[in-house]
Image: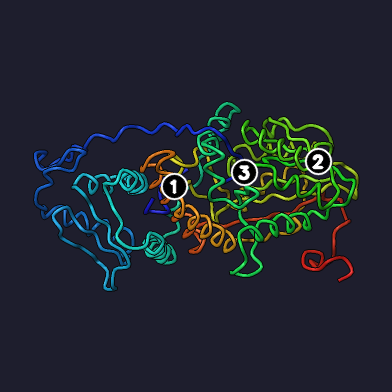
Amino acid sequence: MLDRHSDASGTSTGGATHAVPHLEERPAILNVPGIPQAGIPQANGKAAGGVLAVERGLIRRLLHSLGDPPICIVLWNGEAITTSTRSPVARLVFRDRAPLYRLVLNPDFQFGEMYSQGRIDVQGDLVELFEAVFQSQLDRLNGGHFHTARPNRSRRGALGRARENIHHHYDIGNSFYKLWLDEQMLYTCAYFETAHTSLEAAQVAKMEHVCRKLRLVPGERVVEAGCGWGALALHMARHHGVTVRAYNISHEQVMFARARAKVEGLESRVEFVEDDYRTIDGHYDAFVSVGMLEHVGPANYHELGGVIDRCLPRDRSAGRGLIHTIGRNLAMRMDPWIAARIFPGACPPSLKEMMNIFEPYSLSVLDIENLRLHYALTLRHWLARFEAHHTEFGAMFDQRFVRMWRLYLASSQVAFTTGWMQLFQVVFNRATNNDSPLTRRHLYFDAGG
């Protein structure tokens, strides 16, 4: 979690039960050679004892490995250690010595575990802590350490595994998501006209931005892969006069979307299909996917391209699409703690990896926009709303769950502000389709404006 470029392997589906994904019990204390076991406390943190010289050395090594960020580590006996010449922006408080050894052996995974369990506390702002650490890591990478980044290792996702992964993150209760998402329940990057635009207005603007890029025409047919709670499909039908078939493997989300379509009188224009994107059939004028590619995995991109190829018309002047996804500047594995505890199976791609969707089927990329800072703003809104309801979430689930999600939202916000993560919108069409605007004017001005 702290080391952003080491071993590690998105967002558009949802749920309605209150079941918390299974988490392993608090792990046993590590048996570290050369350290007297009598001095290592049990999980309750008792009898931490004094600090050994080797432990001070391990703390300094850990801070050096992070690029000497301006943070301070406070040990179980109250001793504070920092390796930065700058004033600390936050303090990490170790409740006992066991978290130290866990962090030294596996910092990526164990920081999230120890923080979630309350065995490491943060004094100060969590966002500022991550900004300090991530920026220090970026400074190291910019010094020529990009070779340490390891490529994605994505397993081919069987449908059963895909359903399990979606259930883990999204099927934890619509009531949970309703408390901190916007009123239409969009769980993807919004589009802000200004930094002061409301989250609700920014999400509507995002949907309209997508529709303009697709250049929708009344009467056209659109297929959506991964539709979340249905907001975009309903927006396209209501405001652009198209018919939409939207695919989603989250049962509760599909039920929510169907109910909303019925209330809004759009049942005849929007069909929500509870099935995997690989089963898409029929022919459509446009393909759109917002926040699903993160869950597909690069090993499946050729197959996804085949789905797009067979559902778009082959006429010389037809067939277009848009994919909106969290991404990276280079292929890297997902943070292991987030992959294990928050987004199992997630794998944000690089643009190079995404080309495996388009190249085999002669699909031409027309436009790429990076909305990275828009996602940072989106996450800032989500985190503030999450904190406003943290007491309710503690009652719904438990404090471990609250700390997990707080950590996930805060670190994700900083990942976008510091450039660790990107948000790509890629527009494409058939290679033979010459029906494309000569400028981007259609994105920012109404017809005739």
**Residue drawn at 58 percent across, 49 percent down:** 349
Could you tell me if the residues under marks 1 and 3 are in contact, i.e. CB atoms within 8 Å?
no
The residues bearing labels 1 and 3 have C-alpha atoms spaced at a distance of: 17 Å
Amino acid type, residue under disc 3 in the picture:
Ser
**Residue drawn at 45 percent across, 34 percent down:** 20
* Left or right: 130 in relation to 328: left
Residue 423 screen position, x and y as percent:
60, 56
The answer to whether 228 is drawn above or below residue 387 in the figure is above
Label 2: how many residues lie within 10 Å, few (<14), some (14-19) or many (20+)?
few
**Residue drawn at 48 percent across, 52 percent down:** 386
Residue 45 bears which disc, if any? none
Element marked by disc 3:
loop
Residue 265 bears which disc, if any? 2
* Left or right: 279 in relation to 383: right
Residue 355 screen position, x and y as percent:
67, 49
Label 3: how many residues lie within 10 Å, few (<14), some (14-19) or many (20+)?
many
**Residue drawn at 66 percent across, 56 percent down:** 203
* Left or right: 300 in relation to 107: right
The residue singled out by tag 1 in the image is: 405
Residue 12 bears which disc, if any? 3
Task: Evaluate whether residue 48 shows in this view.
Answer: yes
The answer to whether 380 is drawn above or below residue 407 in the figure is below
